[in-house]
Amino acid sequence: MGMMQSFRLALGQFEPVVADKRANLAKMGELSARAAEGGAQVVCFQEQAVCGYRFRDPEREKVEPCVGDGGRISPAWGVVADWMYQMAEPVPDGPSTQELIKLARKHKMVVMAGLHELAEDNDVLNAYVIVRPDGFVGRYHKVHRVPGDEHSYFKGGQGFGVFDIGPCRVGVLICYDNHFPEAHRILAMKGAHVIVMPHVTAGRSLWKQTDVPGAREQARQWILTWLRARAFDNAVYCAFVNQGSDGGEGALGCSMVVNPEGHVMAETDQTGQDVVLAEIDAKLFYDVRRRTHHYQRYRRPELYGPLTDPAFGAKWLA
């Protein structure tokens, strides 16, 4: 794996149609075309962009709380959102990944997007797929599932991969993963230059006491609280791409790119559909690590062993 090169990155923010892959892939095609016109070599879409992120069928009632440790809901639990499993498909041979490859080939760019993956053992995983014009690059499975529904519906991922996409190496952390800073440090130590962060978060329901512009600004400040720290502490670019909503009554967008100094370098001011373009500067990446801060170099791993002991701190976490 070689040195990082400068390139233009795009984030495609939109509101997907739940359970309508055709509509969502068409929307990603439109946004990819906009990104290509803007000179982007890489475009990233949000978590579950292909299928939409919802666990419950809006036409039916969930009759019992979700329990268990995931991969596939048991009919005995009385949970009725089986449509989600009907959306799941194999990777990379499934139709959605193949459509993403066609999209990458058409626009001569790397494309990344989230979907429901159906594994060979019949488990379902929250996956993020990376493709380029010459085919499939890899996928990441969400490791840290949100307590509740996600634990019941999805099998958890088992590691943190870094993928060579040409101009750089990327790591991926999906939504809730980003509240566990150990994951970002692992990706940085494995050589990631950019961490892509696909989300469905910061919904309007969290800030109902104010108007949409006020709620969006509160969402932005909450995101920046942790996002800048992840970029700065690990001296990496962080690409936060969130679901949007037309009118701002759902997710509030706020997609943005933060550089290794912790500064916002590009962002959207829209709650709905938009494309964010950012110049990923290789010189800045290396300058930060050589002249400003490179904390990985001065770690004391011989003292960090307790972090890998499941019993460590347990009495304080009850």
Image (spheres, grey):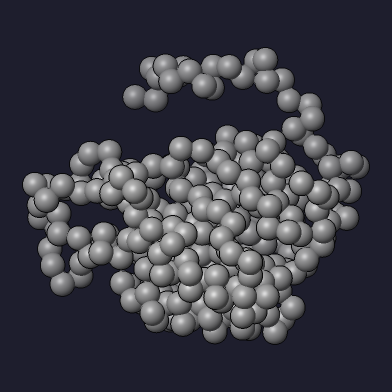
Specify whether 23 is left or right of 169. left
Please identify the quarter of the rendering in which residue 9 is found: bottom right
Count the labels in the image: 0
Specify whether 149 is left or right of 113. left
Q: Residue at x 74, y 55 (%)?
A: 168
Quadrant showing the C terminus: top left
Q: At which x and y percent is residue 223?
A: 56, 56
The one of 88 and 291 positioned closer to us in this rendering: 88
Q: Is residue 34 visible?
A: yes
Please identify the quarter of the rendering in which residue 54 is found: bottom left
Specify whether 232 is left or right of 24. right
Q: At which x and y percent is residue 158?
A: 46, 37
Q: Is residue 217 visible?
A: no
The one of 190 and 305 positioned closer to us in this rendering: 190
Query: Looking at the picture, does residue 165 appear above or below residue 25?
Result: above
Q: Residue at x 56, y 76 (%)?
A: 103
Q: At which x and y percent is residue 226?
A: 59, 48
Query: Looking at the picture, does residue 256 appear above or below residue 79?
Result: below
Please identify the quarter of the rendering in which residue 115 is found: bottom left
Query: Looking at the picture, does residue 251 appear above or below residue 130?
Result: below
Q: Residue at x 66, y 71 (%)?
A: 109
Q: At which x and y percent is residue 80?
A: 15, 59
Q: Residue at x 45, y 47 (%)?
A: 142
Specify whether 68 is left or right of 27. left
